Amino acid sequence: MEKPRIGDALLVALLGVAALLPFLDQTREVSSHEIRHAEIGREMAASGDFLIPTLLGRPYQDKLPLMSGAVALLYRAAGEPSIMLARLPSAIAAIAGAVLLYGIGCTLSGRQAARLAAIGLLGLQGYQDVARTARPDMLFVTATLLACWASTRALAGNGKGGFALAGAACAAASALKGPLACVFCGLFPYAAWFYGGALRSPRGSDWAAFVVGFAGAAAIWVLPVVHRDGGAYLWSFLMQPDLTTWHLVDSIRRFHWPWLYGAIGLLPLALLLPLAVKDALGQGLRAPLAIALAMLMVLSVIPKKRMHYSAPVLPFLTLAIAAAVERRANPRWRHAAQALAAIGLVSAPLYFALVLPRVRPGEDVENVAARRILDRLDPVSPVVCFGEMAERLAFLGRRTEVSEITDDEALASFQKLAALEGIIPALESAHAIASAEKVAPTMDADQVIIVNLSGRGDKDIFTVADALGVEM
C-alpha cells in the first residue's frame, strides 16, 4: 500500500491526451450506434431539455441522459454539433479512468505496478476502441472505477465518506448499464478486502453510507423527472426489455464470450497474461485478478454478451499483469511490459494517420449514402426512414423533420391494408403507410394523402409470418 504521487497521475493524464484525443474527428470508421448518441445529444442541445433524452422526437428509454447531457453541453459551447464532440466525453472519461486505476493500484499493488498498469491500460486495444466511440460504455467504466477507488480509500482508512462517493458513482454507472453496475460495485469491496491483505472488511455503516450516496445522486435526476410527468418516463426506462426479460438459455449460451472478448481487448498486454496466471497459481490469488475473475463470471451469465461489455474488466486484468511483472523483480519482464505499453499507446494514432486513410480513403459508406440522400431532398420536406438511416439523416442534415417507423408499426399497417383494402403491400411500402397513419390525425379533413405502394408484398409474406409467429 503506497501513497499516489501527483507527478505520476499527471504523466498518465498527458499520455492519455496524446494517445486518445488525436483523430477523434475522423469519419472513415464510424462504430455502431455512434450516430444515434450524437443525434440524441443534438436534439437535447436544440431543445434545452436535459432531463428526458429524445431520438427523432421520441423519448429514448434505453439510456438515461448522462452521456447525452455531456454531449449536448459540448454542442452548445461549440455552437455546432460534430462527431468529434460526441466522442470527446468518452475520451475524457478514459483518461480519468486510467488515473483512477493508478489510485486503486497504489493501494492494492504498489506505486510502480499502478503506474505501469495505468499507462498500459491507455494502450489496450479494447480500451482505446471504447474510448474513441460516441457511446456511454466508457462513462460506465469510469463511473465504476470511481466507485472502486472511493471504496478502496475507505477500506484503507484514507477517506471519510468514501462509500457515500462510491454510492453516488454507482448511481451514475447504473444510469448507463442498469443493475450490472450495482453488482460490480458491490463485489469490489469484498474482493479487495479478502484478497487485498491490508484492507479492513466492509461494515454495515459503509453500506448505509453507500445507499445514502446512491439515493442522493439518483434523486438529482429522478425527482425533477417524476415531478414533470408523474414518473411515466422513469417507469418506461425501468420496464424496458433489457431490464425485465431474462431467459436461462440466453444466459448459458456463449458463456465463454466475455473471456474471449477480454483476452482480445487486453492486447498487446495479453501476451503477458500467462505471467499473471502463473503468479496467482504460485503465490496465491491477489485482489486485481480476483476482481477481474468475479466480473467475468457475472458477464458470463447475463443474457447479452457484447465485446464492449468486457471493458470494465480490462483495468483490473492490466493491474494484475503489472503487479505480476513488478513482483518478478526482473528488468527483462519490466522492459517487455513497458515496450508493449508503448506499442499500444502509439498504435491507434499511427493507425488513424497512416493505415486507415489507405484502407478507407473516403468517409464511412453509410454517411456517404446519407449525404447523397440529403443532397436530393428539399431542405424543408419531411423524411420517413426505417433503420439507423433516419438517425444519420437527422444528424448529418441537422434536420428535425425526420421520423422513424418501427418494425411493429410497419407490420400493423401491413395487416391493416391487407384486411381493409385486400392489398398486400411490400414491407418498404408498409413503412410509408404507417407514417401516413401518424400524419393523418394532424391534417384537416379536406386534405389528401397519396401513398405510393412501390412493390408487391407477396414476396414478404413469409417474413411477416415469421415475425407474427404464424406457420405457413
Image (spheres, rainbow, N blue to C red):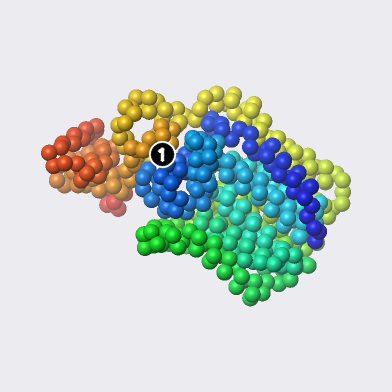
Along the viewing direction, whichever of 146 and 368 lies nearer the viewer: 146
Q: Is residue 193 above or below residue 360?
A: below
Q: Secondary structure at mark 1?
A: helix
Q: Dot 1: within a 10 Å radius of its alpha carbon, few (fewer than 14), some, or many (20 or more) residues?
A: many
**Residue 286, how many percent across, how many down?**
75, 61
Q: How many marks?
A: 1
The answer to whether 346 is drawn above or below residue 245 in the figure is: above
Q: Position of residue 370 (x, y in %)?
A: 41, 30
Q: Is residue 225 left or right of residue 210?
A: left
Left of 147 or right of it: where is 368? left
Quarter assignment of residue 184: bottom right
Residue 356 visible (yes or no): yes
**Residue at screen point 47% across, 29% down:** 365
Nearest the eye: 284 or 240: 240
Vertical arrangement, residue 122 with respect to residue 289, above or below: above
Q: Could you tell me which residue is drawn at 53 percent across and 36 percent down?
A: 78
Query: Which residue is at a point 60% across and 55% down the rendered structure image?
Result: 143
What type is the residue that disc 1 sits on? Glu
Q: Is residue 365 above or below residue 238?
A: above
Residue nearest the observer in this picture, 404 or 302: 404
Residue at left 49%, top 47%? 68
Residue 446's x, y, as percent? 12, 39
Q: Which residue bears the numbered disc 1?
A: 391
